Amino acid sequence: MKQVQDIRVTAADPSGIGLFGLAIVTLVASTQKLEWTEGLGFVLPWAIFLGGFAQLYASMIDAKLGNTFGATAFGAYGFFWLAVGGGWLIQAGVLGETLAAQLDVHQLGVVYLGYLAFTIFMTIGALETNKVLFLIFFLINFLFLGLGLSSLGILETSMHNMAAISELLIGLLSVYGAGVNVLNRHFGFEFLPLGKPFNIIGRRREKAKASDMATHS
């Protein structure tokens, strides 16, 4: 008769490093959009290593922890920044003049609007996490809306500015969220607030359960 052992592998909450990766890349990218800094030479490595790899690492750990929401969010935005970095390399001619000559910014607009649709779903999910994370997703919607419309040539200047300001605010909130996640876990209590969930979906879930029980009773 076979004996089955249940082996559990523990892993640390990756929210801190994932949010830190998002924070740094959005901060540095926003300075370029706001024309506080110039060029993409120093933005590129942060897009790849912090925006991309740090968030993908957080995604893999969240997947091991069974956190579908965190794994999907960090994975989707991690791959986004890797793709953005690849686009900048093509634009700079690093991958050859042929690819650089075939760039059509309207294709980026479609991608950004696709990410906007995805982020709307994630914003709804964030209602049941904490208020800081919800605000980050809420602002990401404006980032992708601005990027998408400006790339399609619709209200280009104002949409670009909206994207830049949203990105800066995302970076600042993500720095706070990353630091607080680490300290709260480290100390074992709410050292600094992240804000309780809105519990809008939770209340609907409880009502649905109560209604289902009443139907089958």
Image: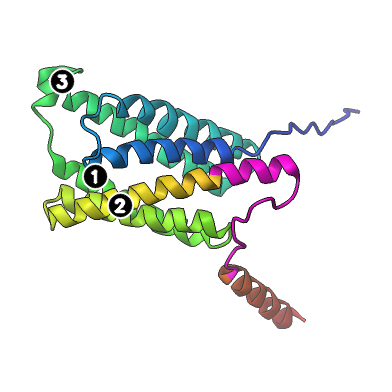
Label ID, residue 93: 3
Q: Which residue is mark 2?
A: 165
Task: Report helix, strand or loop for mark 2.
Answer: helix
Q: Which residue is mark 1?
A: 34
Q: Which part of the image, by quadrant, shows the N terminus?
A: top right
Q: Secondary structure at mark 1?
A: loop
* Residue 80 at least partly seen: no
- Confirm whether the magenta stretch covers residue 185: yes
Ranked by sequence position, the earlier of labels 1 and 2 is: 1
Label 3 is placed on what type of residue? Gly
Element on which disc 3 rests: loop
Amino acid type, mark 1: Leu
Residue extending farthest to the left is 101
Q: Is residue 17 left or right of residue 165?
A: right
Side of 217 where 100 appears, left or right? left
Q: Position of residue 139 (x, y in %)?
A: 38, 56
Check disc 1: other Cα within 10 Å, few if <14, some if 14-19, many if 20+.
Answer: some
